[in-house]
Image: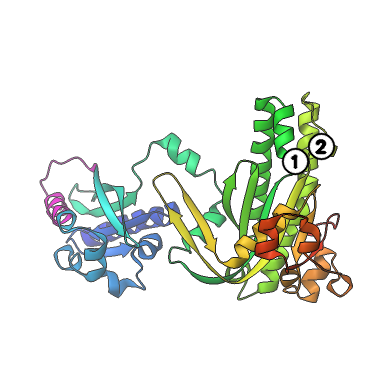
Amino acid sequence: MDHATDLDALRRSVVDALIESRTASQVYDDDGRLEWVSDQMLQLAGADGDTEVGRGMHLDEGLELPIWSDMLSESTRAELRADLARRLQPDHDLAPLWVSPVELNLAGRSRPVGMLGLTLRGPDGRPAGTALVFAPLLPARVLALVSEGDEAMFTRMADLTEPGRRPTAVLFADIDSSGPLARRLPTPVYFDLVRRFTTVFDDLVARHGGIVGKHAGDGASAFFLATCAGPGSESAAARAALAVGLSLAGEVCTIVEALADDGAGVTVDDCRVNVGLHWGADLYIGQIVTGGRLEVTALGDEVNECARVEQVATGGQTLVSKTLVERLDLDDAAALGIDPLRLTYRPLAELAGDDRKALRDAGTLAVVDLTGVPSGS
């Protein structure tokens, strides 16, 4: 095996390891030419393929391509060119592993990351190339905390970088009569109740292909996009939302029983969950990213209407709009244990009493009470 073949084999082994790592990474050969770019890096860059990122081009030329000049500042690209050129010299005495803070411009936002570099050397000690890995400059314990979330749901959130109009099932839920309950229970017990409810809610939403929305106290929301539930399947999105909504009552019973076993003064009778479900045919939905959180939110009349439906629900009711139920095809309805042809709807105004906001925002909305219907899936 000649020298060039040795170096090729070494770089291939590094590429194989980086593929397994699922990182945003690149490998340059011993001549400074871009040999490989990971799929994650292509996705971050918004690239369609090797030509766009300059595979096979020398870094002096390749880094000037529009895709890299948009992602990396001029100073970062100049520093990278100089650094790699030094490390590809046969007699350099620089450390084989190094970290440089850089900023990536992604989706119009500048994000600080760390560029971890590794100088590759062949069996004879001569440079074989360079591997670069781009990753957040975060302490391990912070990364561990972030990684506790559901990966599949985070992937769905990542796909919403560009806000747009999307058909979506909407769910709102909160603990019934939470004010009196919070006053009656010791604060640590009530906090534990809310924390367990939030955990169960998020797990259910993630398991059914949804995206968790905002949490406020003991309230929670979620979105189930037709594009995430299948190829344009509005029925699948409606089914997923209903499966979560219909499961919550049983899950809350399990939480309360566990708290009671631990000696907490709470029973199933005084702790129920109210649920509202609605369909948004044209919601404007996308990411909101701040220094403290990443979340997805939706704008549209149907979001406000769903909030009013949940607001009207009392005593552990699950109120569902006619527009959501009628998104179900017969198979999905049967899987949930629902016969849409036998349901009877009422205007929300008949249930709202003197709730002015509900009457104003959603009084004419047709809803049905599905409390007690088993989740089915």
| Residue 248 covered by magenta stretch | no
Image spot of residue 114 (x, y percent):
29, 46
Q: Amino acid at mark 2?
A: Asp
Measured as percent of width and height from the top left, residue 336 is found at 81, 64
Comparing 279 with 79, the one in front is: 279
Highlighted magenta segment, given as a residue range = 78-98
Element type at marker 1?
loop
Residue 91 part of the magenta-drawn span: yes
**Quadrant of residue 241 within the rendered picture:** bottom right
Question: Which mark is first along the chain, 2 or 1?
Answer: 1
Which residue in the protein does label 2 denote? 270
Q: Residues within 10 Å of mark 2 (few under 14, many from 20)?
A: some
Residue 75 visible: yes
Q: Quadrant of residue 312?
A: bottom right
Q: Where is 114 relative to 297, above or below? A: above
User: Which residue is rendered at x = 43% and y = 66% of the image?
Assistant: 162
Q: Report if residue 244 is visible in the image.
A: no
Q: Nearer the viewer, residue 220 or 23?
A: 220
Q: Which residue is label 1 attached to? A: 177
Tag 2's secondary structure?
helix
Q: Are marks 1 and 2 in contact (CB under 8 Å)?
A: yes
Q: How is the image coloured?
A: rainbow
Give the crowd class for mark 1: few <14, some 14-19, many >=20 residues within 10 Å. some
Q: Would you place residue 140 above or below residue 275 in this image?
A: above
Nearer to us: label 1 or label 2: 1
Instruction: Residue type at mark 1: give it.
Output: Ser
Q: CA distance from mark 1 to mark 2?
A: 8 Å
Q: Residue at x 73, y 69 (%)?
A: 364
